[in-house]
Image: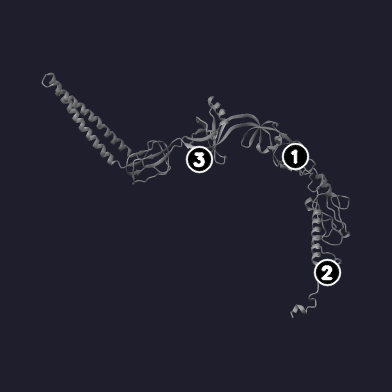
Amino acid sequence: MSMDSKDPTFGRPRPAKTRRLPFLIVVVAALVIAAIAWWFAHATPAQAPGGGRFGGARGGQGGPGGGLPMPVGAAKVENGDINIVLNALGTVTPLRVVTVSAQVSGQLQTVNFKEGQRVKQGDLLAEIDPRPFQAALTQAEGTAARDQALLANARIDLERYRTLFQQDSIAKQQLDSQASLVRQYEGTVSSDRGPVETAKVNLGYTKIVAPVSGRVGLRQVDAGNNVQNGGSIVVITQLLPIDVLFTIPEDNLPAVLAKQHAGTALSVDVYDRGGQTRLASGSLASLDNQIDTTTGTVKAKAEFANADESLFPNQFVNVRLQLDVMHDATVIPTSSLERGSDGLFVYVVQPDHTVAVRNIKTGPTEGERVAVTEGLKVGEEVVTSGADRLREGSKVELPGENPQNAGASGEKASASAKPGEGDPSKRTGNRGDGQQGQGRGQGEHRRRDSSGTGTGAPGSNPADGAPATPADAKPADAKPADSGKQ
C-alpha cells in the first residue's frame, strides 16, 4: 500500500473554505487596484477658470481669461528695400581647358613646370630631344641649296643661248630646250622649300610651350620617357576670367530678356553650397538660343573676374540673379508668418501686451525678409517666435520685460494671510478625524499627513513662496510623541 493511502484525508473532498481562497485573493487585489486608481484620480490637479496654481484660463497660459503671459519673440515692421532675385543651381565652367600634348615623337628631355603652377601663354613647359629633327632640317636645306645652284647655272646658259640665237649661231630648238630646263629647276627649288619648312616646324615642336594662360594640372609624363605624337603632357585650365553655367525657368525668361534688350547689365552673385557665404559677384553674359523641353528651362552663363580665384572649375554653387529692386517696401521677418484657413496672417502685439490676428498679403521674399503689400504698417510689432499657443487676445511677454501676471495680486494676498483666517488658499484639515485635507487652491496637489493619527499640518507649497510650516509647527526632523508608540 502506498503512503498516500495512509493519509487520513486521502480521498476526502477539500473544504469549501479552501476552494474559495483563490477567488477572495483576486477580489482583494482588484479592490486594491481600484482604490489606488481612485486616489490618483482625485489627487490630480484641477483647473478652474481665472485661478489655480498656474494662473491660466481654460485656453492655457496667456489666454484671454487672464493668467501668466506667454513669452514670445517679436520684431518691428520696418521700411526697406527688397531685391527681386532668381535662385538657381550652377556649375563653375572655365573659359578654356587645353590638353597639352606632344606633336612629334621622341625622348622627353626636360619638364620645366611644377604641378599647379600658374603659366602664361608662350612659357616653355617641356622639351623633346631636338637632334633628329635638326639633322632632318640640315638635309632638307642641303638638297634645296643644290637645286638652287643648278637653277642658277641653267639661267646663265639660257642667257647665252639667247645671244647666240640672235646671232643666228644656234637653232631655235636648243634655245627652247634650255628655257624648259630653267623652269624645271625652278619647280625643283620650290618643292625643296616644303621639306625645309617641315623640318623647321618639327624642330620647333620639340619645345612644348603653353598655348594659353592658366593653371597647369598634374603632369602625365616624366622626363626621360619616350613620347609619341599626340601623347598628353599636362592640362591647362584658364581661371581668369571664369564662367558659371546655370538654368533659368522659362516663366522668368521674359523679364530677363526685357532687361537685356534695354541694355541693363544684370548682376549675378554666387554662394557656396550652404548658401551662406558669397564667393563672387559678376554679370549675366549670355543665354542659350533655345529652351530645353524636358526641363522647361534655358541655359544661362554668367562671367566673373575671379581675381582671388575663389571660383574653381566644376565647383557647385548657388546662383542669385538680381532682376529688380523693390524700394521703400514694408518688410517683416519670414518667421512671423502664419498660415490659416483665410491665408497668411500674423500676430500683432498691442500696447496692452495682447495680440491681435491680422490677415496680410505678401510680396517678394529675400532670404529671411518678406515684403508685405497689405495689412501692416511701419512701426507695428509682430510675433516671430512662440506663436503656436497664441490666439486672439492672448497676453504676451516681450523679451527683456517683466512678466505681466494678472493673478499676482491674488497670490500676494494669499501669501500675507495667516492660517485659519478664512484664506481659501491655505486651508487645513484633520486627517485623524476622518476629514480629507483640502489643498491651497484650485489646481494644487493635496498634502497627506504621514501620521495615521493627530492633527495634520497646514497644506503648503514651497514653489509658491509660502512658508513650509507655520511658526508653531514642529520641525520636520522632530521625533513623534511617545503616545504614538505601542
In this rendering, would 280 be left or right of 156?
Answer: right
In this rendering, would 107 be left or right of 448?
Answer: left
Check the image and report above or below for 200 versus 22.
above
| Front residue (pair 156, 304) | 156
Q: Quadrant of residue 110?
A: top left
- The nearer-to-camera label among 1 and 2 is 2
Residue 87 lies, in percent from the top left, at: 57, 35
Separation of residues labelled 1 and 3 (CA atoms): 48 Å
Q: Which residue is mark 1?
A: 391
Check the image and report above or below for 312 versus 374.
below
Kind of residue at badge 3? Gln
Residue 111 lies, in percent from the top left, at: 36, 43
- The nearer-to-camera label among 2 and 3 is 2
Is there any visible trace of residue 160 in the rendered image? no
Of mark 1 and mark 2, the one earlier in the sequence is 2
Q: Could you tell me which secondary element the residue under label 3 belongs to?
A: loop
Residue 106 lies, in percent from the top left, at: 31, 43
Q: Which residue is mark 2?
A: 16
Q: Which residue is mark 3?
A: 315
